[in-house]
Amino acid sequence: MKTVRQNLIKEARRLWRLMVFEEFNGRCFLCGRPAHDPHHLIPARHLVGRFETKNGVALCRLCHGKVHDDMDIAAEVKERLPEKYEFWQKNKHKSCKMMNYEIKEKIEIMRKEKDNG
């Protein structure tokens, strides 16, 4: 049985994924093919920005693999998206644990943004 926290994270991840895909019209940022994977500029394990759309880019599976395997391609993504790169630069060294109430707040914000979209 899943805990409350696991369910909150699952819902926040689902909304984040949808919003990232919507931002890029469901297309891979690098090649234009249909996107299958949202990619975190700051790895999700860092938690800072884990559910911020500024920390996401839509990619197809092929390009997502390339971004993880090739630092030059990863750098290209960040450079071509200056507003996202700025967020990444400010937050890449931070690490914190999100409390359940913070995840709930983020879910509510994402729902409102999606509805007003």
Image: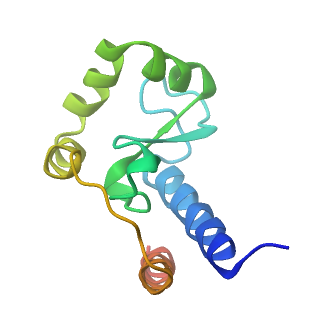
The number of numbered discs placed on residues in the rendered structure image is 0
Which residue is located at x 64 percent, y 38 percent?
36
Left or right, residue 54 beside residue 18: left
Image quarter hosting the N terminus = bottom right
Image quarter hosting the C terminus = bottom left
Colour theme? rainbow
Which residue is located at x 21 percent, y 46 percent?
93
Which residue is located at x 45 percent, y 48 percent?
45
> Image quarter for residue 75?
top left
Is residue 22 shown above or below 37?
below
Is residue 77 shown above or below 58?
above
Along the line of sight, the residue nearer the viewer: 42 or 67? 42
Is residue 90 shown above or below 8?
above
Question: Residue 109: horizontal and vertical position, in percent?
Answer: 42, 81
Question: Residue 99: horizontal and vertical position, in percent?
Answer: 44, 78
Along the line of sight, the residue nearer the viewer: 24 or 9? 9
Which residue is located at x 62 percent, y 76 percent?
5
Residue lying farthest right? 1
> Image quarter for residue 33?
top right
Question: Residue 32: horizontal and vertical position, in percent?
Answer: 50, 28
Question: Residue 78: horizontal and vertical position, in percent?
Answer: 25, 32
